[in-house]
Image: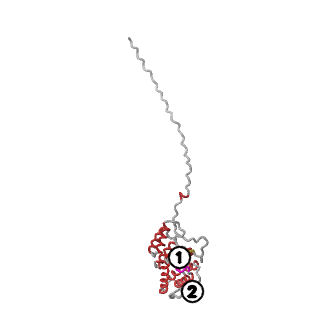
Amino acid sequence: MTTPDTAPPTDQTTTIKPTVQDPIKAPEPDKVLPPAPIPTPDQTAKPEADKGPSLDTNNGMIKPGQPLQVKSLTDGMKPGGLKDTLATAEDQMRKGKYTSALDQYDLAERVAPNNPLITLGRANAELGASYYARAEGSIRRALTADPALMLGQFDLGQFLGRDRVDFLEKDLKDITTTETKSARAPFLLAYLKYNAGDLKMASNYLALSEKRAGKEDPLYKQLRVYWALPGADPIPDSTPDMNK
């Protein structure tokens, strides 16, 4: 039996289909984001640095001859560390601890440097401690930096204690009598008398300071205007009790 020849394989044609690429898409436009919310003032405002105490002399009611009575440098201050520091300083002064009060004024000046009212508070503590040269220098710096402070009348009996003020007056009178060339003691007496409300004696002591200074002192001239002092009576340099 003859086996039929096997038919040769038929050529198979392989059809290559072209690869169909996805159509190139145009880049999407940038998305427009909604505007950022505007921060409220509470979110952006930084706590304002405490500039320290100040006298409210800008209300048009305070003027020479009508002084602002000051019983504490903390009056009108917002609660916080600086107010507490100044309150501690004043409490130390009332207790007669003047050097401890000066330590507190050092701390206050670090928080609010170059604040003339703090400098004047320091001057009161220096005066209470009988650091007369330092007190005079601090008073001058404070009043020269901010003449509006001359419109304040500070209750030194409240700050230093009545007994201490009495001692200071007696001590400074003695110095005025013995140190007849120095203008410092009568100047400090003028400061004490003005703040006690005795304008006549403040004027007399300031006149003696002017006489001893030997030349015009711009601060003395300003004090006469801001303190609205009456005319002075001539005072001999060696008068033991200048209240007579």
Mainly helix, strand or loop, the magenta region?
helix
In 3D space, how far apart are the residues under numbered discs 2 and 1 (Cα atoms)? 25 Å
Foreground pick, 165 / 11? 165
Q: Mark 1: which amino acid?
A: Asp
Name the residue at the right extreme.
60
Helix, strand or loop under label 2: loop
Position of 159 relative to 4 (above/below)? below
Magenta span contains residue 194: yes
* Crowd rating for badge 1 (residues with CA inside 10 Å; few <14, some 14–19, many 20+): some
* Crowd rating for badge 2 (residues with CA inside 10 Å; few <14, some 14–19, many 20+): few
Helix, strand or loop under label 1: loop
Which badge, 2 or 1, comes first in the chain's sequence?
1
Disc on res. 155: 1
Magenta span contains residue 229: no
User: Residue at the spot x=45%, y=24% of the render?
Assistant: 12
- Is residue 98 something one can see in this rendering? no
Q: Position of residue 152 (x, y in %)?
A: 55, 75
Q: Mark 2: which amino acid?
A: Asp
The range drawn in magenta is: 192-197
Q: Position of residue 156 (x, y in %)?
A: 51, 77
Mark 2 or 1: in front is: 1
Disc on res. 36: none
Q: Quadrant of the C terminus?
A: bottom right
Position of 15 relative to 123 (above/below)? above
Foreground pick, 25 / 87? 87
Q: Quadrant of the N terminus?
A: top left
Disc 2 target residue: 233
Position of 225 relative to 108 (above/below)? below
Q: Position of residue 235 (x, y in %)?
A: 54, 87
User: Residue at the spot x=52%, y=63% of the render?
Assistant: 48
Look at the numbered discs 2 and 1 and tell me whether their residues touch, using CB distance below 8 Å.
no
